[in-house]
Image (cartoon, rainbow, N blue to C red):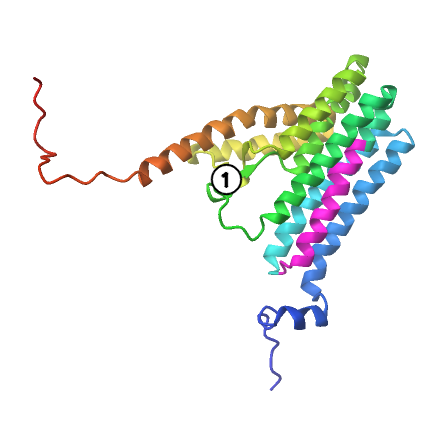
Amino acid sequence: MIDEPDPLAEDRLSPRRRLARGLSMRAIVPNAITAAALCSGLTGIRFAIAGDFEKSVQAVILAGLLDGIDGRAARLLRAQTRFGAELDSLADSISFGVAPALIVYLWTLHQLPSLGWIASLAFAICCVLRLARFNARLDMLDQPHKQAGFLTGVPAPLGAGLAFLPIYLWIATGIPEFANDVAVSIWMVLIAFLMISSVPTLSWSKMQPPRDLRIGLIAVVGLTVAALLTEPWYTLAVITLGYLALIPLGIASYAKVRRRAQGQAKPVPAAGPGDEPDAPSDPS
């Protein structure tokens, strides 16, 4: 009788032995997806250099989709490793920090060399700082936003999507005002600030629609996919504006959760020797 391999044997190895053996096959799958996302983001820069901004934006969006898959693949395969976390952050810093900054600069910010380049640098640097902050907090237990089911600031892939909003509108409408270099510079700096801010934003775990609306939500998702296939740029602009509208909702929801938690944790004052808490107070 042939003994079957123990799927948990890899997890019981010490970190030194695990490093000596290298990455297992199940750990290679999510890391390969991460590498594909990195290649997609870099290819977006290549398209931008060639002046094909539609394909450059599409390449970064594809990188965002792959970035959403790799983490879920790692959890599904039980292949979460520190190497994978570090690789994911490094890939994200390029695909959603450097690539969008260069794409937007080559699109319109090069017309304003000093301010435009500073705005692009601000976006790229803030994206890297956000990812560094995320890595530094991986082992921290005291994370109020995470414990309440919220994110801190705008995630890097969504920040890249928000940075492309003027390009969506410019491609969809052809109106040259959407490519105004000064306005786009200010927009890039604003999105950079949102990425490194401490603003609580909604995570997938907090987006729980009422039970009676879930069937309708499925229909909305299907229609959104159809809209992406027929009118992709208008649809991307609407999705981006919808996410921006959810930011104040996330702030209000977190404030409500925090007030509720503080109310539950508030200690009840103990009665003194002469106190009669149930007796009505004397109006005189």
Q: Is residue 108 visible?
A: no
The disc labelled 1 sits on which kind of residue? His
Q: Residue furthest front?
A: 273
Q: Residue furthest bottom?
A: 1
Q: Position of residue 145 (x, y in %)?
A: 50, 39
Residue 233 falls in image quadrant: top right
Q: Which residue is mark 1?
A: 145
Left or right of residue 261, residue 131 in this image: right
Q: Position of residue 128 (x, y in %)?
A: 71, 40
Left or right of residue 128, residue 222 in this image: left
Q: Which residues are magenta?
A: 79-101
Residue 49 falls in image quadrant: top right
State yes or no: residue 44 in magenta.
Answer: no
Residue 258 falls in image quadrant: top left
Left or right of residue 204, residue 255 in this image: left
Task: From the image, give the main secondary structure of the stretch colored magenta.
Answer: helix
